[in-house]
Image: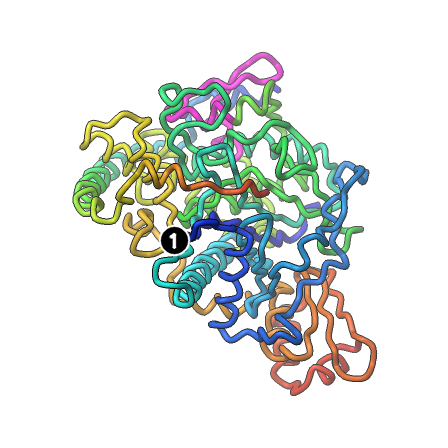
Amino acid sequence: MAEREQVQKPAPAERETEQADAPASSERGEEIKAELDDLLDEIDEVLETNAEDFVKSYIQKGGQ
Amino acid sequence: MAIVKTLGIETEYGIVHRGTDEPNPITASSVLINAYLAAAGYRTDARSDTIAWDFTDESPGMDARGFAPVGAFAPDIETHLVNAVLTNGARYYVDHAHPELSTPECADALSVVLFDRAAELIAQESMEAVNARLPPHEEIVLYKNNSDGKGNSYGCHENYLVDRATPFGRIVRHCTAHFITRQIYTGAGKVGAELPGQRTDEVPFQLTQRADFFEEEVGLETTLKRPIINTRDEPHADARKYRRLHVIVGDANPAQLSTFLKVGTTALLLALVEDDAIGTEFEFAAPVASLRHVSHDLSLAEALPLADGSTITALEVQWELFDLARKYVEATGTDKVGGDVAHLVLERWEQVLGALETDPMQLADQLDWVAKYRLIDGYRERHGLDWDDARLRAMDIQYSDMRPEKGLVWRLGLETLVDDDAAQRATTMPPVDTRAYFRGRSIDKFPDQVVAANWDSIVFDVGAEALRRVPMMEPMRGTEAHVGNLFDECDTALELLRRLGS
C-alpha cells in the first residue's frame, strides 16, 4: 500500500492550473448567485401549494 | 484484457396518479406506457399487442460469484405487464410499480447521455399522451428521483460489458472504492436521511438519494439488503466471453454532466481493472458505513478508514483514480473506452474534482446535488426555514418533476452535453454503433414480422415456417456499418433473414 503516499502529496501540475483559474470561477459563482436570486423570485409560482400534503402523499412502492 | 465497453442505464421513474381515490401505480404505469405507444404510432392492436419482450434467455438469479441461489427465477410474473421494445432499441416497461426506461446499448458515455435524455423526452411525451386521455381532474406525473423520503427506493441501474476472464474479486475491490467515492459528483442530492434513528438535524442534506438504502458489500439482491456490488450475472451476450456488471448503487440524474461522469469514469475504471492497471488498492475498513458517510458529508473532507488503519478522503481516492485513468489512456489509447469521448470524460473529471476541491458551489449549474443544494438552501435562507420544513422536502421532490413547467431542475438552466433536437431524434432512431441498431431497425422496418425481442435476440415470424430467432450475442455487432446497407436493400423480413444467412 506504499502507493497511497502519493495521494497525500501536493497535486500534480495540472491541478495548479485549476487553482489559477479560481478567480474566473468565482465570477461565475457570482453570476450563479444572481441567477439563483432571480429564480427564487419566480419559483414561488410553481411550488406545490400545500407542501405538507404534497410530501405526505408522495408515496412510492419500493423498486429495484 | 480490456474489451470494448458497451454500456447503458435503466431508470425507474417515480409515478403519482393525482385526482383518484385509489391510485394504483402498476395500472398507472401501464396506461402511461400504452398511451405513449399509441401516440407514437406503435402497433397496439388487441390481437398481437405490442412487440413483446422475450424472457427466454433471462436469468437474473445467476450470481457472478458462480452459483445460482435458491429461489432465483426469470421474472415471468411480470410478463403480463406492458413490456415494449422501441425503434431506438430501448426497452419501456413496467417494473415493480414503476415505469422503467432502459437505454439501448451504447458505445460511449455521451451516447448514454443522449439516450437518457431521449428517455426523459419519452417520459414527457408519455405524460402528455396519457393526461390527454384522463378525466380533467386526474393527472399522472413522473419523477426522476430514487426515493419517496419515507424509506422506499427505486433505482437507476448501470450496465457495463466486461471481460469474463477478469477475476470478479478484482472488480469488487476496485469498484467498491469507486462507488463509495464517485458520489461526490454523481449524487442527485436529498433533503434529510432515511436511516432509522437518523435525525434531520444530523443530516439536513446529503449528496445522494440512494446511499441510505445499502446494507451489504456484495450480493445478488436489488430490492432488499441492497449491496454496493451487485452480483447478478446475466450478460445478455456470449457468457463465455462477457460479463455484465450490473451497478445498482447510483442515483438517477437529471443533470447531464452527472450522468456523463457516472458512466464515463466507471467505464474507464473497468478497463483499468481488466488490464490490471491499478497498483493502488483502496480497501475500505467499513464500505457500507463509508458509502453513507461520503453521502452525508457536504464538506467532502470526511476521513474514511481503510483496512490498513490509515484514512483517506473521497476526493483523494478520486484524484488517484483520475491520475491512473489518464496515464492508462495515454499509454493504451481510447479504442476500448469510447474513443474521443474518453478524452472528454478525463477533461471533465479533472475539472469537476478541481472545482469540488476549491468550492463545490461553482458546479451549481453542472451537478445535481450542488444545483439542488444551492436552490433549496437559498430558499431556506430567504424564508428563514429549518431544514425539516415540509417546503424543503417538497422542493426536493419537485426538483425531479418531469413536467417541463413544474420540475425545478428544468428551470435551473443546467449545462447540457447533448442538444434536444438530437435527443428527439434518438427517441426513435437507434445508436448506429452497437447491436441496438439491428434491433431498432428491425422493429422500425418490419414491425409486423418481429414477434418478440430482447437484448440478445430477435424473433421473426416470416410466414408458414417456424419462428426464426436471430441471436445477437455480440453487443458490438449488428451496427450500421455491418447491416445498414442490408436494411436499406431488403424489402421484406424474409429477404433480410436470407441475406443474413440465418
Quarter holding the N terminus of chain B is: top right
Image quadrant in which you'd find residue B372: top left
Does the magenta portion include A17?
Answer: no
Q: Is residue B432 left or right of residue A27?
A: right
Quarter holding the C terminus of chain B is: bottom right
The magenta segment is B292-321
Please, what is the three-letter code of the amino acid marked with disc 1? Gly
Taking the view exactly as shown, the residue that stands out farthest to the top is: B309
Image quadrant in which you'd find residue B430: bottom right
Q: Is residue B192 left or right of residue B494?
A: left
Q: Considering the numbered disc 1 on the image, is that residue within a helix, a strand or a loop?
A: loop
Q: Is residue B111 left or right of residue B486?
A: left
Instruction: Give the letter of the chain under mark 1.
Output: B
Residue B80 at x, y percent in the picture: 66, 60
From the viewer's side, name the closer residue of B107 and B179: B179
Tell me the residue at 66%/85% (across/down).
B490
Taking the view exactly as shown, the residue that stands out farthest to the front is: B21
Residue B8 at x, y percent in the picture: 57, 53
From the viewer's side, name the closer residue of B116 and B462: B462
Q: Which residue is mark 1?
A: B19
Tell me the residue at 54%/50% (across/down).
B98
From the viewer's side, name the closer residue of B17 and B33: B17
Answer yes or no: is residue B66 visible: no
Tell me the residue at 24%/31% (across/down).
B380
Residue B198 at x, y percent in the picture: 45, 20
Label 1: how many Cα within 10 Å (few below 14, some 14–19, many 20+): few
Answer yes or no: is residue B119 visible: yes
Does the magenta portion include B296?
Answer: yes
From the viewer's side, name the closer residue of B76 and B495: B76
